[in-house]
Image: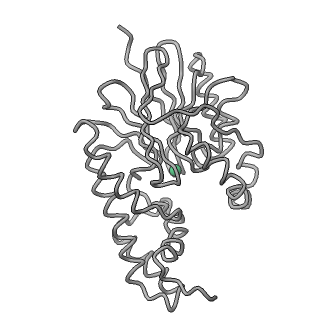
Amino acid sequence: MTSEPIIHRYPEQREGAFVNAYLIETARSVVAIDSLLTVSESRAMRAGLEQLGKPLRAVLLTQSHPDHYGGLTELVASDDVPIVAPQGVMDTIARDDPAKEQILRPMFGDEWATTRTFPNTPIADGETMTVDGAVFTVIDLGPSESPHDSPWTLGPDERIVFLGDQIYDHKHCYLADGFYAEWLANIEKLRDMFPDDAVFYIGHGGPVGRDMWDWQREYIERLLDAVSSADWSASEQAKATVVTRMKEYEPCEELQFLMELSIEPVAAKLGLLATAT
Ligand SMILES: [Zn+2]
């Protein structure tokens, strides 16, 4: 009988953390779920791994956005380990990374890694990775919060779920990729998939329970409604109106810029922006 895996969350300083990732410690090994965005936070996560004194055996990715893979080079260091994700996540990262470099370099400077490491080991929906008796199973969701998402469950009873960004814990959300219809459908698919007492380890805040599905659905629906009902003949005014309405729903300021970055792309996807500028 092996002991239960221990879940370590990074960064350890959670206050104001942009994103979090996890080290899963078993009796003799460690598995990482995602890396962090910045070089220094990913280096601190690596230091946490080395303090555990057990080898890193695999990294599992929950989705294709750079806040989840950007720190892989620091996290993995010289370890030759599988970095596992569905093919769609691997293809999305390879396709979008040059564009992310253009966006993130001015925002983060040297904290956005100059040498980035990509996933190297594809896995199919429902397949498992077993490390030191801990069984991780991937759910290949396809487009959702990011262009390709892949939550993982731990253990045969699926009570521990690494959900990625399917739920944000009372923080503003990123919808700029425009897959909100798929995201809403995935919420309905996932909410009935796990036991009532399942614990969701997520990318932004948490852990949370199943009650947060309703918060997340309503956040997306409100954003769509706020964008749809704004007057786009004056776009700055329209954006300000959407921000106000979303702050009424979620007063916190954390990740508000992600929501602000999402308003125009959602309006464009809804066909509300004039094509001539
Ligand atoms: Zn994220």
Count of marks placed on residues: 0
Task: Tell me: residue 82, above or below residue 106.
Answer: above
The residue sitting at 25% across, 44% down in the picture is 192
- Residue farthest toward the bottom in the current orientation of the protein: 233
Residue 12 visible, this angle = no
Residue 199 visible, this angle = yes
The spot of residue 123 in percent (x, y) is 52, 32
The residue sitting at 38% across, 13% down in the picture is 3
Image quadrant containing the C terminus: bottom right
Query: Residue 101, located in which quarter of the rendered image?
Result: bottom right
Using residue 37 as the reference point, say whether residue 22 is left or right of it. left
Using residue 158 as the reference point, say whether residue 36 is left or right of it. right
Task: Tell me: residue 10, above or below residue 260.
Answer: above
The residue sitting at 49% across, 18% down in the picture is 131
Using residue 159 as the reference point, say whether residue 104 is left or right of it. right
The spot of residue 74 in percent (x, y) is 69, 35
The spot of residue 246 in percent (x, y) is 39, 71
The spot of residue 40 in percent (x, y) is 68, 41
Task: Tell me: residue 25, above or below residue 239.
Answer: above
The residue sitting at 57% across, 25% down in the picture is 58
Task: Tell me: residue 102, above or below residue 187.
Answer: below
